[in-house]
């Protein structure tokens, strides 16, 4: 079961704002001039303990920061209410897709939606706040799960791809009650394609849904080429499946061919 505790945190929000330079330019320049070393350290690692803490204190005293924090508190209540409404359905989905009992206890530190920040920061904590959640409540739910799952899995490209499969794609379809999904990281797209035939076996997807996924990824493969993996994969839980994928030498097993489509741009600029 996934359990999320929601809160806000002034210090973490201030550190993240400096790390991302999410401040009025004149004040950011002021902090840069006065606390240059600390500013640089926070940009490299927002959790740095080697800074002059006055940089944090000065930011927290600003009226714009207090407005941001008030927005964060309102965003927390909105997101928490949304989560409570859907958490049982989400956990039922996760239990089904994990194929095992599991427990993940995480803390979600909610930011104002205008800061557009989402990342797992370790110690079973993540920060979240995005403007898209204001008009799409499912978006918030999907990425609450996405960031939470980074606390369950080890951090590598394969696990990140599986997290996207679970939350950004499969959970999004369930909650949206449609084929609407959220696009993942572009640099993981090829890995998604390589894993796809095995993922279909793991989820025991119907032919209809497999064809929908193929269309989404603009990819084609013959299912008969992967029948030999059926009996091994179909009884795996999510942990065993990831171990299985990590042991595959994709270069030896798969020949992934890329296709290009060229279309003339309307009214091109020439010369």
Image: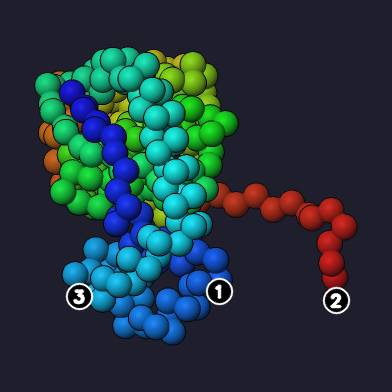
The residue carrying mark 3 is 50
Instruction: Please state if 200 lies on the left or on the right of 182 as rendered.
Output: left
Q: Position of residue 228 (x, y in %)?
A: 22, 28
- Residue at image coords 25%, 52%: 121
Categorize mark 3 by other alpha carbons within 10 Å: few (<14), some (14-19), many (20+): few
- Residue at image coords 38%, 60%: 60
Is the Cβ of the residue at disc 1 closer than 8 Å to that at disc 2?
no
**Sequence-first tag of 1 and 2:** 1
The residue carrying mark 1 is 26
Label of residue 100 in the image = none
The residue carrying mark 2 is 271
Q: Is residue 63 above or below residue 109?
A: below
Element marked by disc 3: loop
**Pair 3/2: label in front:** 3
Instruction: Name the foreground residue: 36 vs 235.
Output: 36
**Sequence-first tag of 1 and 3:** 1
Is the Cβ of the residue at disc 3 closer than 8 Å to that at disc 2?
no
Instruction: Please state if 7 lies on the left or on the right of 133 as rendered.
Output: left
- Residue at image coords 74%, 51%: 263
Q: Where, by quadrant of the figure, is residue 110 drawn?
A: top left
Element marked by disc 1: helix
Q: Give the Cα distance between marks 3 and 2.
A: 53 Å
């Amino acid at each position: 079961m996934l359990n999320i505790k929601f809160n806000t945190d002034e210090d973490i929000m201030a550190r993240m704002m400096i790390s991302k330079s999410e401040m009025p330019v004149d004040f950011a320049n002021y902090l840069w001039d006065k606390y240059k070393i600390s500013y640089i350290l926070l940009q490299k690692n927002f959790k740095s303990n080697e800074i002059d803490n006055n940089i944090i204190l000065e930011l927290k005293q600003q009226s714009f920061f207090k407005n941001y924090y008030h927005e964060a508190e309102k965003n927390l209540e909105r997101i928490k209410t949304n989560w409570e409404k859907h958490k049982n359905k989400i956990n039922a989905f996760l239990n089904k897709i994990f194929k095992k009992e599991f427990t993940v206890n995480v803390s979600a530190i909610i930011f104002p939606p205008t800061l557009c920040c989402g990342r797992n920061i370790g110690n079973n904590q993540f920060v979240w706040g995005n403007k898209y959640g204001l008009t799409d409540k499912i978006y918030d739910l999907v990425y609450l799960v996405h960031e939470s799952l980074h606390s369950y899995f080890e951090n590598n490209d394969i696990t990140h791809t599986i997290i996207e499969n679970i939350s950004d794609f499969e959970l999004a379809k369930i909650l949206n009650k449609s084929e609407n999904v959220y696009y993942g990281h572009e640099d993981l797209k090829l890995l998604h394609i390589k894993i796809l035939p095995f993922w279909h076996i793991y989820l025991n997807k119907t032919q209809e849904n497999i064809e929908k996924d193929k269309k989404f990824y603009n990819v084609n493969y013959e299912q008969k080429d992967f029948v030999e993996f059926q009996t091994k994969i179909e009884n795996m839980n999510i942990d065993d499946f990831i171990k299985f994928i990590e042991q595959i030498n994709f270069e030896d097993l798969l020949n992934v061919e890329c296709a290009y489509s060229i279309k003339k741009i309307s009214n091109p600029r020439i010369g």
